[in-house]
Image (tube, rainbow, N blue to C red):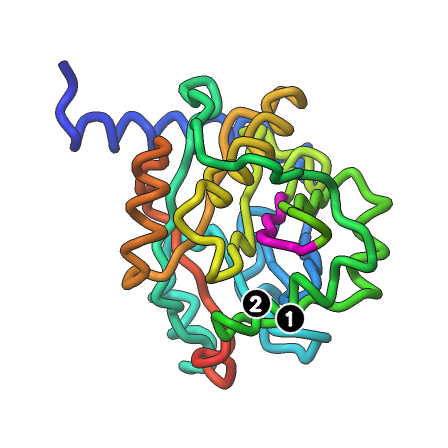
Amino acid sequence: MKTVVQKTKSFLFETKRRFFQNRNFIKKNVSIKLGMRRLFFSQTFDNNKYFIDQILKPHEGINAAVYIQNPQILIDQSEDKLALDPSVCYRLELSKFNPIKGKNRNVVVRKIRLDDVDGINRIYGYYGMCPIDRETVTENMHSSVVTYFVAEKNGEILGIVIGVDHVKLFNSPERGSTLWGLAVLPGSRGIGIGKLLINYIVEHYQTRGISYTDLYVDYYNRGAINLYVKVGFRKIPRFFLVPRSDSHTV
């Protein structure tokens, strides 16, 4: 059996091989706004200076750079205008996913509607998370790139999860996706809403032939990390950068 070090080396080698094999097909300089922040995908940028300029350029919402492999270089080249976010990246290989059973009677999971935005922002407000805006949600609702799922019971929004399809967004040769903004109404925690939302977003991407789903989670959020690990997510070496001026607000 392979050791953890051998598995990590194999993973990194295979990731790089597939990436560089298909490099010319990837869309360049890609970012997307989700409603609470704009994400910049580092694997689509060839020029560090341009990448840094774009992250530091004012946009609506908070900018964040994801899939960073060498954050120390970008921080140095930005003259310390970028900061490392205290998040850890976890990956779920979708071929290995088994649906999770949870206590979710009478809870309906469906795609977002515009009248859900206030309920979602109420949940995000409990956790100090950035709110989503209606304009961006409206744009993304009609796109195949972003998917919003909400959990609802008796007309009340109990949870939210957002997914980004990397194939639709930038022709990802790895056929990846990311999960963002998973949150559950505090009074509804412990009844399986988070697991239910993960089930829906994962099964949604399995039907599209997506290989994996990644997420970033604050390293001190042990409850969330325990849930993700239990589901099958495993830590990978990818980092998250934000403008230093926003490092305490993401």
Q: Is residue 131 above or below residue 143?
A: below
Q: Is residue 6 left or right of residue 159?
A: left
Q: Which residue is mark 2?
A: 124
Query: SS at mark 2?
Result: helix
Q: Residue at x 37, y 33 (%)?
A: 231
In which quadrant of the rendered view does residue 125 lie?
bottom right
Where does the image place residue 5, in percent across and percent down from the top left? 16, 32
Query: SS at mark 1?
Result: loop
State yes or no: residue 137 in magenta. no
Where does the image place residue 230, in percent across and percent down from the top left? 31, 35
State yes or no: residue 161 in magenta. yes
Q: Which residue is mark 1?
A: 131
Type of secondary structure dominating the magenta stretch? strand
Q: Residue at x 61, y 73 (%)?
A: 62
Image quarter hosting the N terminus: top left
Determine contact: label 1, label 2, CB under 8 Å. Answer: yes
Q: Nearer the viewer, residue 195 or 34?
A: 195
Mark 2 crowdedness (10 Å alpha carbons): few <14, some 14-19, many ≥20:
many
Where does the image place residue 89, in percent across and percent down from the top left? 38, 49
Q: Residue at x 84, y 65 (%)?
A: 135
Q: Is residue 200 left or right of residue 126?
A: right
Of the image marks 1 and 2, the number of the one nearer the N terminus: 2
Please provide the residue range marked out in magenta: 156-163
